Amino acid sequence: MPTKLIMDTDPGIDDAAAITIALNHPDFDLQLITTVAGNVTVDKTTLNALKLTRFFNRNVPVAGGAAQPLIKPFEDAARIHGESGMPGYDFPTDLADPLPITAVEALRDQIMAADQPITLVPTGAYTNIALLFKTYPEVLPHIKEIVAMGGALGKGNMTSAAEFNVFTDPHAAAIMYAAGIPITMVGLDVTMKALLTPATMQTLPTLGRAGEMLHALFTHYGDGDKTGIPMHDVNTLFYLLHPEAFTTQAMWIDVQTDGPAIGETVGDIRGAYHNGQTNANVCVDIDARAFNDWFLAAVKAIG
């Protein structure tokens, strides 16, 4: 049976790749897309989600969410993803409208109406998730798990300590990790290893309309280098389908919410500070070749 998903996202180029897989893979049943300010402003992330649902002619509802973090000033990543968030491809312009309710309301309604617990896949700042948990705590027992892109046990990509999604709204991340829901952290420790290789990039535009679109976006992506480009957000879906390709470690994750280390995810790797308790399953290594092979196969299957 396909996994029922909700994606909370900020497309963004690698988010676009993740949405592409979630909309089309037979093992996923994407119920809702909610958007948040992150890579670009929320009006643009919402528009980009609508472009993707229209491109694939998928009737998946989209709801716009938080325009800024809970407390911290907003900083986008347009330098990486371009001013629109998804430059390089001319998408259809006859788009559907987003839902006439907020992302938090849409999340609450979809989760409570589902006939089985939902898997949440946040691939942007976690602002909507935190607002959902604080506003509608009744949803918590109806969430199966959270598989979240974000965080790092080692080097960050916004500061030496902090990864972008957590740095964008560290207070929201702290709320999410304190919610008591099973969480898998898919952070830079694996996403900076699972690079799309030059050979994968060369193959991609030969794989049909979806491959052509993604290749066009990736050539405008300001992340990565000549060795390859990271598909941070796609790793969440790869994990859901192929957890055997990952090495994970259970630990307690604390989130720094102020000072020069703001946005850092600190793993209690020795189990020394929380009486042996853990609140996250942290991905620490990945089979990068398997990721490339899977990604190409998934895009090829779309056609």
Image (cartoon, rainbow, N blue to C red):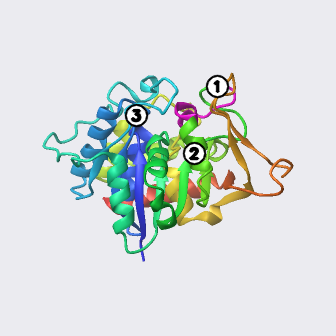
Residue at the spot of label 1: 159
Badge 1: few (under 14), some or many (20 or more) residues near its Cα, within 10 Å? some
Between 225 and 64, the residue placed more toward the observer is 64
Q: Is residue 145 above or below residue 67?
A: below
Badge 2: few (under 14), some or many (20 or more) residues near its Cα, within 10 Å? some
Residue type at numbered disc 2: Ile
Residue type at numbered disc 3: Ala
Residue in the picture at 61% in, 58% down: 180
Find the distance from the CA under tag 3 to the CA under tag 2. Answer: 18 Å
Instruction: Point out the frontmost of discs 3 and 2.
Output: 2
Q: Is residue 48 above or below residue 222?
A: below
Query: Which of the marked residues, 1 or 3, is nearer the chain's N terminus?
Result: 3
Where residue 48 appears, as percent x and y from the top left, is 30, 40
Q: Which type of secondary structure does the marked residue at label 2 adopt?
A: helix
Where residue 58 appears, as percent x and y from the top left, is 24, 58
Query: Which of the marked residues, 2 or 1, is nearer the chain's N terminus?
Result: 1
Left or right: 133 in relation to 267: left
Whether residue 207 is visible to the viewer of this picture, yes or no, is no
Q: Is residue 179 above or below residue 46?
A: below
Find the distance from the CA under tag 2 to the CA under tag 1. Answer: 21 Å
Look at the image and give the residue range highlighted in magenta. Answer: 159-170
Residue at the spot of label 3: 37
